Every structure is written in structure tokens, then in C-alpha cells.
Amino acid sequence: MRVLLLSEVYPPRSGGAGWSTRALALGLREAGHCVSIATTSPGPLDLDGLDVRRLRARGRKRLAVPRAFAAHAAHAANEADGILHAQHSLSALGALAGAWASRVAVTVRDHWPVCFWSTRISQGALCPRCGTVPMTRCVKGRVPGPAPFSWGAIPYMQADLAEKRAALARAGATLAVSRAIASELTAAGIPRVEVLPNVVDAAETRAIAAAEPSFPLPERFLLFVGKLEENKGARFLIPAVAGAGTGLPLVVLGEGSLAHTLKFDATAAGVSLVLRGWAHREDVLRAMGRATAIVFPSLWPEPLSRVLLEALALGVPMAAMDTGGTREIIEDAESGLVVEGAAALSDAVGRLAGDAALRRRLADGARARAERFSPAVLIPRYEAVYRRLR
């Protein structure tokens, strides 16, 4: 089959959504399919030997990016057996803009069909629901101007969500990366939703992690990987580590608006912080493979964290907050520790740091569970979806 993957985010500089798209592309190519990628993200055209088309989108992002994908999709849709698979919100709007929408699969990797901000977080806490009154809360600090003037953005936000849901309803297949995402899509009235997780190639992940990172690391350390933002629980990170009382340094690979807050909190709490900022994926995996444990304080309903999936593949002990699809990755006390609340997270971090036997047992369980997300298991399921769309 000829498969075109469309995504506004793609390596080399990308978050989990882009790397998950790449993993899918490589898995499909290995299975013998003709795969190409269209993206508005900058980078080389021959990454991994794949056919990567870097589209230009000039103008306001919300309008220009879907238009660029729609134009490219129109050409691809002329292929008799071509399948279009959109990987994110703006690429989905473009791919679903034409008469070929019934031949489009869309993977939903976060909360964009149900939350304007895609996080379901407002004012540092989980949004109870979406509606006019709750939106007066979530515009605070995000839309310029004091209330009630900032409320003028609410009709636009509601129209934007309505457009996204209407477009998604036209898709031939809607693929949620977790049961947690699938349940909220179904509740929002999206038809034809099925769960199909992200692909992780454990062999490649382990091969990359085996080499030395490009920067020095402590002999033993705790690790956080991700954006330093509210939804990733960045405000809870230092209190969780300080409360664990392990004395281990905390290495942070990521950047975001809470970086300065993290430094201040670490100094106040006496936590040794190594804040590296953004790092190449190779260095991220190499740091993960050497970490004593990963601290995962996420606040938002995690769709299906690639950090945790790659930690599974590497057999890294994890202490994670129980949000969204996290339990669909980690079997508590079998492949990691999944807890509720900041105090319990501190306790879990302390247990992992102080119990080598526990770390070894969880590492073995994690590597075994990673097979559920392997190309061998998941690519045949993607192929079945594509056959239905032809």
C-alpha cells in the first residue's frame, strides 16, 4: 500500500507525537509499504531514508497549516490505493477538507477535539468540563486583557472546537492512542473510534541508549524528561524529589515557561538540580538508560506518554502519577509504580532509589511489557485499518 502520513510535528526537533509518527513510518516501511511523510516542521528531506516532504505554510498558523496539508492531500488522494493518515490536529483539518475524507485515518494523541488548549488544564488544575462558564476560567492568563474583556475569545474557542469535531466526524477511522482518549472522544460524539497505541521499537531504542551521552551525568540520579509546563506537573517535580529525601541529584531534560520556577524551588528545597534544557533524542535515551529512576509527576490526563513507552523498552524504573492512559502503559508494581497524589509520588521515588531488588524486578517487567507496543504487534493492526479505508 501507499501510505501518506501527515503531521505538523516531525523530527529531528520534535516531541513525542513526531517521534511516534516516525516510528510508525519505519514500521510500515519494514512491512513492505510505500511510505511518505508530509510535514510543516523544518528539517532534512531524507531523514532515515524516508520520503519527507517539508511543506511551506505562510500566514497565520491556524489557517495556513491546514491549507498546506489540504493542498498536498488533494494530490495524494488521486492515487487509487493511497491511504492518508493524519497524526495531529492541524494536519487532520487539512486531510479531512476534501471529498476523500472517508479514506483518511486520524490519530488523536492529545485532547485537541475536546479542549481548545489541548491539555484540559486551566489555572494549574484539571478542568472539570468544557463550556461557556468554565471557559471564563481557562482564558485567564492566556488571553490578553482583564475579565470580562478576555471573555470575548470564548465564541472563537467554541467555534474552533466545533470545527475540529465536525471534521473528525468525517474521518474514515479515528484512532485514539489510549482507552482514556477513546472514552472522551466517544463522550464528545465522535464516531468510529478505536484504540491503537503508539509504536515503540525496543531494539532501536536500546541500541541508541547504549552509547555515551554527549554531556556528563552523575553516577546515580533521578530524571525528568518533558516540557516544563503546568500540564506536565513541573510544579510538583521539586516537591516530589525533596519529599523523597534520597539525596540524589535531579537531571531535567526539557524546557518551558516554568524553568525559572524549577530553579528557585530546587534552591529553596536543597535539591541538586541539573537543568540541561532541550536535548536531542539520542541523548534523552542515553540519559534514560542510565537513570536510577524516572520521576513522572504529570498533572494532565496523559494520552499515552512516549517518555514512559521508551522507559519501558529500556527497563528504567518509573514513579508516575496516575493520570489518563498511564496505567495502560505501566502495570503498577509489575513494570513501574503508579500513584495518586504528591505525597505518594515522593514515597514511590524514595522506594525506587533505596531498593535495588525492586528496581531490577520492575526493569524486567517493563522490558517484557514493552513488547505490547512493538512494531510486530501493532503494525498488523494499522494495516487492517488501512485495508478498510481503501
Image: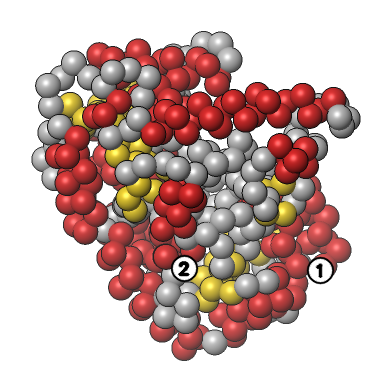
**Which mark's residue is nearer the viewer, 1 or 2?**
2
Please tell me the numbered disc located at residue 153. Answer: none
Q: Which residue is mark 2?
A: 327
Residue 227, relative to residue 150: is it above or below? below
Which circle's residue, 1 or 2, is located before the other in the chain? 1
256 or 113, which is in the foreground? 113
Q: Quadrant of the N terminus?
A: top left
- Which residue corresponds to the image point at 13% horizontal and 45% vertical from the top-left? 31
Task: Find residue 286 and report its horizontal and vertical position in percent.
Answer: 45, 58
Q: Secondary structure at mark 1?
A: loop
Q: Quadrant of residue 39?
A: top left
Secondary structure of the residue carrying tag 2 is: helix
Residue 276, image x, y percentages:
63, 50
Query: Is disc 1 in contact with disc 2, using a CB cutoff of under 8 Å?
Result: no
Q: Residue at x 47, y 68 (%)?
A: 327
Judging from the image, the colouring scheme is: secondary structure
Which residue does the image show at 32% across and 50% down from the upper left?
194
- With respect to residue 180, does 115 lie above or below? above
The location of residue 101, given as percent across then percent down, is 30, 25
Residue 299 as seen in the image, left or right of residue 390: right
**For residue 270, which numbered disc appears in the image?**
1
* Snapshot quadrant of residue 22: top left
User: Where's the C terminus, which quadrant?
Assistant: top left
247 lies left or right of 316: right
Residue density around tag 1, few if under 14, some if 14–19, many if 20 or more, within 10 Å:
few
> Does 70 sit above or below residue 206?
above
Q: Residues within 10 Å of mark 2 (few under 14, many from 20)?
A: many
Residue 220: x percent and y percent?
58, 72
